[in-house]
């Protein structure tokens, strides 16, 4: 979410006077000084009600000096702050909705209130669009704009990440280890079946979080600890090296009916496409928007270990298929899932939000679909 909003602000800054209200973080002064837009830092408390007050106060002081024409609510939990500011200055609000935050039972009431009181809502997939409409938001107030990724130069497969042998077949997942619905556990459970036919396969996980210890124990209990590598969080250059090295990128997110967990889109698929890598994704949530089944990757039932292993093995064993999927993914990432397209789609939403009420319903979808 942070990267999406930062890239959006950068893209809009060329034509607009953009101000971003963000929490204080270590090293933020250096980062802020390199932006093409203004960054106002609010106190970075972790207790959400206090953080909202800090955000609201910082935003109000800035808005009194430079009144806004429109307010963008980057997270529904900040909805009350954005709503109050919008009423004070008589301007519209455009809210973002991703997936989990508007489905989680503990956030349902606030999320629904924020969405219904926004002039327009931007979603990242058809799945999230339907979830927003389930909160009572009219269809003509909801736009779908697929997230983007930077298109990087393609490097040879042998462009090495630190350590490891080139003969290894790398299955890569890039996702925080914070929510079970992300599906790291299912990929680990599928690895014994993969290793039976591809003994040089290695499952590499980039990301960290509270589930790491559990996943490490799971791999050990299946006797495959040596074939599963946990790298934690990596800087951009190191992450790029692993994308370049990967034979297939996978994210097996599933929908959780208990806590509302679901993948809103799956930006890792776009990043994999930028590297020309084939992908295997869970057929759930917004992932079918990110992965065109049989074209840019393969979709599987994320709860079926056998289906997961079969899909991974298909890509690992069929060089022509892997190349075709990777090339199509690269083509989509470059021509459709670009930041200029994302910014243009968002600009259409802004134009609709600023339009007279009679014209407000003319934009129900924006950007490449």
Image: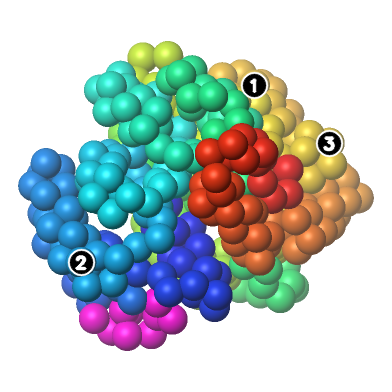
Instruction: Identify the residue shown where x is 32% and y is 22%.
Output: 108
Please report whichever mark, 2 or 3, sits nearer to the chain's N-terminal start: 2
Instruction: Identify the residue shown where x is 55% and y is 34%.
Output: 141
* Residue marked by disc 3: 294
Horizontally, residue 150 falls left or right of residue 48, namely right
Secondary structure beneath label 1: loop
| Residue 64 disc label | 2
Horizontally, residue 77 falls left or right of residue 246, namely left
Secondary structure beneath label 2: helix
Q: Quadrant of residue 196?
A: top right
Q: Where is residue 355 in the image (x, y as percent from the top left)?
A: 56, 49
* Residue marked by disc 1: 301
Let me know if residue 364 appears in the view.
Answer: yes
| Residue 44 disc label | none
Viewer-nearest of discs 2 and 3: 2
Question: Marks 2 and 3, Cα distance to the nearest angstrom?
Answer: 53 Å
> 6 or 292: nearer the eye?
6
State the extent of the magenta-drawn residues as a range: 29-37
Question: Marks 2 and 1, Cα distance to the nearest angstrom?
Answer: 52 Å
Contact between labelled residues 1 and 2, with CB atoms less than 8 Å apart: no
Let me know if residue 217 appears in the view.
Answer: no
């Amino acid at each position: 979410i942070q990267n999406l909003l930062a890239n959006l602000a950068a893209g809009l800054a060329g034509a607009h006077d953009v101000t971003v209200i963000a929490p204080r973080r270590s090293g933020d002064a250096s980062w802020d000084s390199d932006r093409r837009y203004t960054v106002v830092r609010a106190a970075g408390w972790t207790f959400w009600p206090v953080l909202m007050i800090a955000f609201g106060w910082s935003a109000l002081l800035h808005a009194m000096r430079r009144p806004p024409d429109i307010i963008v609510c980057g997270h529904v939990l900040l909805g009350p702050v954005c709503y109050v500011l919008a009423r004070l200055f008589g301007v519209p609000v455009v809210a973002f909705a991703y997936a989990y935050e508007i489905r989680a039972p503990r956030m349902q009431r606030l999320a629904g209130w924020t969405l219904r009181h926004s002039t327009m809502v931007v979603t990242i997939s058809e799945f999230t669009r339907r979830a927003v409409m389930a909160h009572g938001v009219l269809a003509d107030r909801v736009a779908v704009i697929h997230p983007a990724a930077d298109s990087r130069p393609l490097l040879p497969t042998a462009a090495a990440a630190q350590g490891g042998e080139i003969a290894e077949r790398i299955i890569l997942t890039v996702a925080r280890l914070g929510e079970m619905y992300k599906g790291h556990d299912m990929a680990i459970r599928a690895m014994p079946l993969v290793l039976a036919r591809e003994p040089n396969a290695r499952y590499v996980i980039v990301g960290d979080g509270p589930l790491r210890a559990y996943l490490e124990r799971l791999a050990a209990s299946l006797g495959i600890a040596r074939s599963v590598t946990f790298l934690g969080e990596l800087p951009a250059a190191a992450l790029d090296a692993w994308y370049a090295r990967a034979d297939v990128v996978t994210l097996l997110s599933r929908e959780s009916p208990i806590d509302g967990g679901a993948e809103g889109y799956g930006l890792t698929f776009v990043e994999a496409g930028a590297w020309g890598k084939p992908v295997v994704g869970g057929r759930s949530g917004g992932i079918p928007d990110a992965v065109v089944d049989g074209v840019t990757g393969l979709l599987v039932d994320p709860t079926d270990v056998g289906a997961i292993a079969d899909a991974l093995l298909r890509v690992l064993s069929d060089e022509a298929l892997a190349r075709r999927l990777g090339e199509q993914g690269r083509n989509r990432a470059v021509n459709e899932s670009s930041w200029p397209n994302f910014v243009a789609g968002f600009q259409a939403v802004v134009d609709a939000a600023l339009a007279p009420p009679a014209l407000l319903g003319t934009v129900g979808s924006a950007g490449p679909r």
